[in-house]
Image (tube, rainbow, N blue to C red):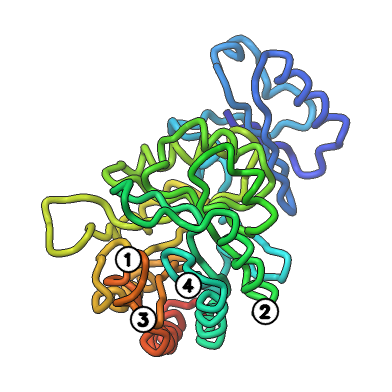
Amino acid sequence: MIIVLKPGATEEQINHIVEKLKGFGLQIHMSKGEERTIIGAIGDERVLANQPLEIFPGVEKVMPILQPFKLVSREFKKEDTIIEFENGVKIGGKKIHVMAGPCAIESKELLIQIAEDVKAAGASFIRGGAFKPRTSPYTFQGLGEEGLKYLSDAKNKTGLLVITEVMDPRDIELILPYTDIIQIGTRNMQNFRLLTEVGGYDKPVLLKRGLAATIKEFLMSAEYIMAKGNTKVMLCERGIRTFETYTRNTLDLSAIPVIKKLSHLPVIVDPSHAVGKWDLVAPMAKAAVAAGADGLIIEVHPNPEEAFSDGEQSLKPKAFKELMKELKVIAKAVGREL
């Protein structure tokens, strides 16, 4: 349920409403705009069936949230969520930001080299996996904390922000000091214990869509994070499984405008995992920007044939640089910046 307060509602009036709602066992989430404050009451709304909230001082109107996802819903928050980072980077605004780097961190020297290359091309984030959820238990699983330290070195060297994946709730405390965004991978989209744990931290989260998840299921997973208090959530479309086998997955471009219609959260697109072939990454990245994506996450490696993971879908730095130039033109055409 959403309680919209009148312009100029006093703190005393707001606190009175909040305490009343808490007394009914509801979770309270507030969104303060320039003109109005909105209170979201999450829980069993049947307890309010006989409570005339409209007569409370300061209340303008009361509206039910019709979607099963509440805090994620555009009904709860009309304006787009913008996530701001320590260096002034903002995801969700007019400017589109690109996260780029290797699938897996392999060595300090190589990671710093890639970070320097992608920064020169215009990327805002260095990506790299220190913990790798691989299909086979016999393939490279990542460098662990050693890899996280390499990410920190790359950040210190280039000034790029960091995004890396967490797979296990027990690793969250380890990863937090090293990263600016916690990535939750596609295989963990419905790992509700992990989602709940991450929701307890004030750290931006990039949640990837599950292999065969509907948009409703995707948004419900984001709700798990936000319900614990973390509102800094980004949603990543990275392709879903269909009957098509030529590409690794099928990039659901329609998910971008659909999610933006249903939710206020920023949408990031991963064309690398969507197609699984390096020569298809650029056209899908361009299409994603044209469709309204707020950012891209792209795999880059100077020697894809020697990459420990996903070399076949990694762009070489030169190709990435050319793509970034082309993306600027498309971004401008749709009223955005890159």
Between 195 and 37, the one lying in front of the other is: 195
Give, as a three-letter code, the residue at label 3: Asn
Q: Nearer the viewer, mark 4 or mark 2?
A: 2
In space, the residues marked 2 and 3 are separated at their CA atoms by 21 Å
Q: Image quarter for residue 57?
A: top right
The residue to which callout 1 is attached is 310
Q: Are marks 4 and 1 in contact (CB under 8 Å)?
A: no
Between 168 and 52, the one lying in front of the other is: 168
The residue to which callout 2 is attached is 157
The residue to which callout 3 is attached is 303
> From what the image shows, is residue 157 above or below residue 77?
below
Q: Nearer the viewer, mark 4 or mark 1?
A: 1
Give, as a three-letter code, the residue at label 1: Asp
Q: Nearer the viewer, mark 2 or mark 3?
A: 3
In space, the residues marked 1 and 2 are separated at their CA atoms by 25 Å
Q: Position of residue 171 (x, y in %)?
A: 58, 43
In the rendering, which numbered label is found on residue 100? 4
Between 254 and 112, the one lying in front of the other is: 112
Q: Position of residue 293 (x, y in %)?
A: 43, 65
At horizontal 41% and vertical 53% (from top left) the residue drawn is: 141
